[in-house]
Amino acid sequence: MNDLEFGRTSYLIRDLIFGDSGKGTIGEFLTWWLDQFAPIWSKVHTVIRTEGGHQAIHNNILPDGRHHGFSQFGSGSLTSPIWTHHAKGMMVEPLHALDEGKDLQHLGVRDIFGRLTVSRDVRIVTPFQQAANRLREYARGVGRHGSCGKGIGETASDALAIGTDALYARDLMDSAILREKLSQIQAYKLAQLADLIYRFGDDKAISAEIDWLTNTAASSILVAYLGEFVERVKIVENAHIGGILSRPGSVIFEGAQGVLIDEWRGFHPYTTWSTCTFDNALELLREHQYDGRIVRIGVVRAYATRHGAGPFMTEDPFLTNALPDTYNVTDVWQQTFRVGWFDAVAARYAIAACGQVDALAVTCLDRMRDLSQWLICTGYELSEDDSNAAKFFELDPQNPRIARNIRLGPHKDLVYQETLTEQLKRVKPIYEVSANAADFGQRAEQHLARIESELGVPVAITSYGPTVLDKRMVRPV
């Protein structure tokens, strides 16, 4: 087992595409695999969340058919007595966390609340911010950004705008402060959305959102419900994570969403308000002088998907119809779930944005079983009138109308990212056959080999179905 036998390991799991690639099921598998095959001192003891919030739904399915979509508890908690820690970069919606914990209890998970710790500086998502988020997205009409409608962007924006007047986990422990801050946030959101409420006030589709912002009793009602959250979970100092990282064994930093919708490196404005690269996890590890092993795992599907609006370079209507997704369906806020061929150009961009990826996990190979020929996008054809392409793409030396890579722009330059987005809306994918063997298993091996070759990163984990028994550790990590 070499390094797995001794010391500590931090596994950083991130989705390299637009999200929905299976971060949670890979975290669940890694927890199970280490539990089954590694020494006791190498097992996973904690899942750490450093970004995003309850908009993340990480599906775990057990061989006996039990299913849970993990949102505010660490993936793997359905079968392993692991802890979950929300570090200071997270956003938590306490009412949703209470419901989720109770769902897990009904599935037979004991002491799930007793194994949840929340940093005092975690930002708290309120129903007021969720309502504001939905009102803004509704008002965009056909120009929607693809929001989940969960208030994540509103909460992040408020924390930047009003600082300590925003709501944090530490405020939940004082009912007077909590009531005052809830009232202030409600008034703040109502003032921001007054014009939209005037325009859409009679629209029944958003009447519940308007009620949250105008109900004068809402803050008092919330104080009573939030008291249960404080009683059930542990709100801890930021330094608590130092003790977690010093324990023998392994931790998993479970990411949210995907690198291609990262707040700074994603294709703006169709992005989230979270950092989806490894940056937050690495910053915490540096801050606490972590000296254990660090393994960066990038997760991709064997094909591409995107849930919501925004450029999707390899979108294919045939695949969208042929590969419907059980847990990602068209909904009111994100709307359409789209499918396309594997995009090596976008994946290479995501790897560059991350700085380093040590291993790949490739999921959903089984979904392609009935396709006799598999394709992979290896370049983009640019429009003839695009004279500025070299600023955004690395061009093929033999043909300047073909882009082989997307260039990384200046960090945190959203003007650059938005211009890049407009460029990507106009490209056409260039495909090559990645697999066409008669046997499904051989097609899968051909496709995996091509992904490794195109991305320059070894495949360590493969997935041929939803449960841990459907996954393979082809290279120990």
Image (tube, rainbow, N blue to C red):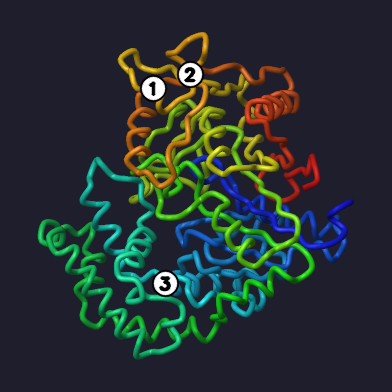
Give the CA separation, mark 1 to mark 3.
Answer: 42 Å
Looking at the rendered structure, the kind of residue marked 3 is: Ile
Instruction: Residue under label 2, please give it.
Output: 395
Looking at the rendered structure, the kind of residue marked 2 is: Leu
Helix, strand, or loop for circle 2? Answer: strand
Helix, strand, or loop for circle 1? Answer: helix
The quadrant where residue 164 appears: bottom left
Looking at the rendered structure, the kind of residue marked 1 is: Ala
Q: Nearer the viewer, residue 100 or 411?
A: 411
Q: Nearer the viewer, residue 141 or 272?
A: 272
Q: Mark number for residue 389?
A: 1
Q: Mark number for residue 124?
A: 3
- Looking at the image, residue 146 sits to the left or right of residue 194; the answer is right
Q: Residues within 10 Å of mark 1 (few under 14, many from 20)?
A: some
**Residues at circles 1 and 3 in contact by the CB criterion of under 8 Å:** no
The quadrant where residue 159 appears: bottom left
Q: Mark number for residue 114?
A: none
Residue drawn 60% across the image and 70% down it:
85
Residue drawn 32% across the image and 40% down it:
415
- Looking at the image, residue 214 sits to the left or right of residue 395; the answer is left
